[in-house]
Structure formats: structure tokens, C-alpha cells
Image (tube, rainbow, N blue to C red):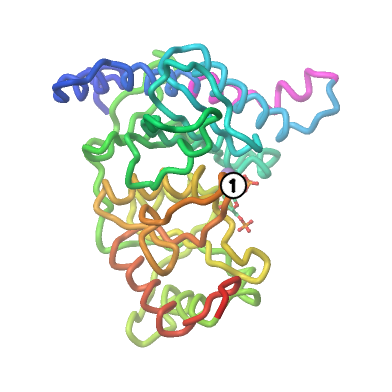
Amino acid sequence: MSLTMTLGRHILTAQRSVPDATGTLTGLLYDLALAGKVVAREATRANILESAQASQEPKASRLYRFADATFIHLNQRTNRVGVIASESHAEPISTNIEGKYVLLLDPLDGVSQTDYTVSLGTVFAVYRRLADGPEGGLADCLQSGRNLVAAGYLLYGSSTVMVYSSGHGVNAFSLDPGLGEFLLSHEDVRIPSPPRYYSLNHAHDDFWTPGSRRFARYLQGKDSTFPGGLSMRYTGSLVADFHRSLLGGGIFCYPADTIYPQGKMRLVFEANALAFLAEQAGGAASDGVQPTLDLQPTSLHQRTPFYIGNRELVQMAENFIRLHEPVRPGDNP
Ligand code: AHG
Ligand code: MN
């Protein structure tokens, strides 16, 4: 942990190495960190607040609305962001006509497990506005992940951690609650190899396709080509499971199945941001056929199958799918 490298200083230092930087992205990342601190404070007091309030609203939905409102509010009134879209809103929200960035948010992932004090996360992605984007900004939000300017997440776990990349590697900062500062805790993160863990909900295996089933067996060490396999960890909170793979090495998988024929993860709000981080950390992300970042979003809330983590494991997932499921559920043969 570096006491001297706060998140604010790190962002400013990075900005100085970009010749034509105006400081707008710096300010935006700073606002996201501030919103993260506000949500972290609220999330850790959720049990206490619930018992102190007369409201009948469940804790999870109250916290979800709080996180959504906080991230939107803190970014709406600046002149940095022109369009915000959040998983919780059907349409994009136009903010400031002058704002040159687009902000995409999953405000509080894993929220259905709030009652059990499981780690939660906020996922964010930042694009430049398209010069000729129509009013309302839908086209701004449906950009390919290859256009990402910055992306990251806040993880509200045993520590609050902010992980981000602006295209020059991945750095992680842990919140010192006493200081109220995010301090650099993991510099220039590279996904370690060999991997240690896989994250996959085996309870769904009856609904999987043959390729996914065979890949799951491979990860378990039941395939002769990978004796021993990997150890399984699954929280049901994507950000926490991805964070483990990022720091410890591994793969998170949410395959297409007969319940979610296009997968469960949202391409625009979840998958692209994490895929950007994975690639920046030397890993990979795929829908089982091609890199997530190469997918062209066609609707704001579209879902995607998702395999993310060590590059060799993601490639192995693609191999199993190519060999065992030439036609995907939902595809027109
Ligand atoms: P939610 O935000 O509604 O709690 O959903 C969480 C997401 C994601 O974070 C997690 O990886 C996945 O759903 C878990 O889904 P399953 O319960 O189907 O495994
Ligand atoms: Mn989510």
C-alpha cells in the first residue's frame, strides 16, 4: 500500500503524460471515486439504517436506488458528461450538451444478495461522445468496446477497492476509511499465470449446451488434458468474482443457457468494462466465439454469454464451444 500515491495524484500523474489532456477525464474519474465512497459508506451501514428506518422498502432495492442516484447525481451536474446510461433506466439520460463523455453504469451489481452481506460492486465505462451522435445519445451508448476511453469498478467488500484503466494498464486503489482516501494497493496489475480459480454456477448445468458442460468438466479436472483442474469460487457477485480472477488468476463464466439464451451479463453495462480491464491486464474476455470488445452492441440492455480471465482459459472455452456447439441457442441455424 502506497501512502504517497493517492488515487487523485495517480490520475493527475497519468494525465500529465497525455499531451492534449484537458483534465476532463481526470475530473470524471475523481467524481466516480467520490460516488464510490458515498455508496461504500451507505452499503456498510445498510443493516443499521434498515432497522432505524420505518420504511417498508427492502434493503436491497433501497441501496440499489441510492447507488444509482448517487452516481448519476455526482456526474449529472458537471460539464464533463453529456450522456449517462444506467442498467436501472430503460433509456439514456441526456445531461449536459457540452459534456464530451458518455458514462455507462451498473450501479450496484450483486444487489440481490445485500441481505447476506455479500460483496457488491459498481461497474463503469466511459466513451467519448460521437461528434454526430443524435439527440438522446443512444448511439453514443452503443459504441463498440474497442472505443472505450476508461473503465473500471468499485468493489464494496472487506475493503472498498477502485480498479480502473484508462488504456495504460490496470491499477487498484484501496480505501483507507480513516483518511477517506483511495491509496494505490495494486500497481500495474497483470493476471497471474498459472490460474488458480474458476467461477461458474454449476446449478445451471442442466440448462447448458454440450460445449459449456464439457468446458465445466475441463475446469473441474475431469478432462484428461487438464488433470487437477482449478479450485471453484463463486459469490454470485460478478465484480467480486472477477476481482478474484484478476488478482489470483482464473476465469469467470456465465454461459448461454436455456433460461438465458443470450447469457445473463449485460454487454453495455457490465461485460465491456470488465473485458477492457482483462485485456489491459494481459487477459481476455469472450462471448465464447469472439472477443467481447469486438461485439457491436445493438440495444442498450442486451445480454451476452461471458468468459473472462486468463487468456489461455478463455481461448480454451472458445475451443470447447467451437468443437461441441456449432449452433448456439437463440441462433438461427
Ligand atoms: P444481481 O445484481 O441481481 O444480484 O445479479 C447478479 C449477477 C452477477 O453479478 C452474478 O455473477 C450473476 O448475476 C449470478 O447469477 P446466478 O445466480 O444465476 O449464478
Ligand atoms: Mn449487474
- Secondary structure, mark 1, is loop
326 on left or right of 194: right
**Residue 261, x across and y down, in percent:** 61, 67
How many numbered dots are placed on residues in this image?
Answer: 1
Q: Is residue 51 magenta?
A: yes
Q: Which residue is mark 1?
A: 301
State the residue at coordinates (65%, 71%). 258
Q: Which residue range is magenta in the image?
A: 36-54
Residue most extreme to the bottom? 224
Q: Nearer the viewer, residue 148 or 170?
A: 148
Quadrant of the drawing holding the C terminus: bottom right
84 on left or right of 113: left
Q: Height in image: 249 above or below 171?
A: below
Inspect the image, locate mark 1, and give the three-letter code of the amino acid beneath it: His
Q: Is residue 175 magenta?
A: no
Quadrant of the drawing holding the N terminus: top left
**Residue 215, x across and y down, in percent:** 45, 76
**Residue 225, x across and y down, in percent:** 32, 84
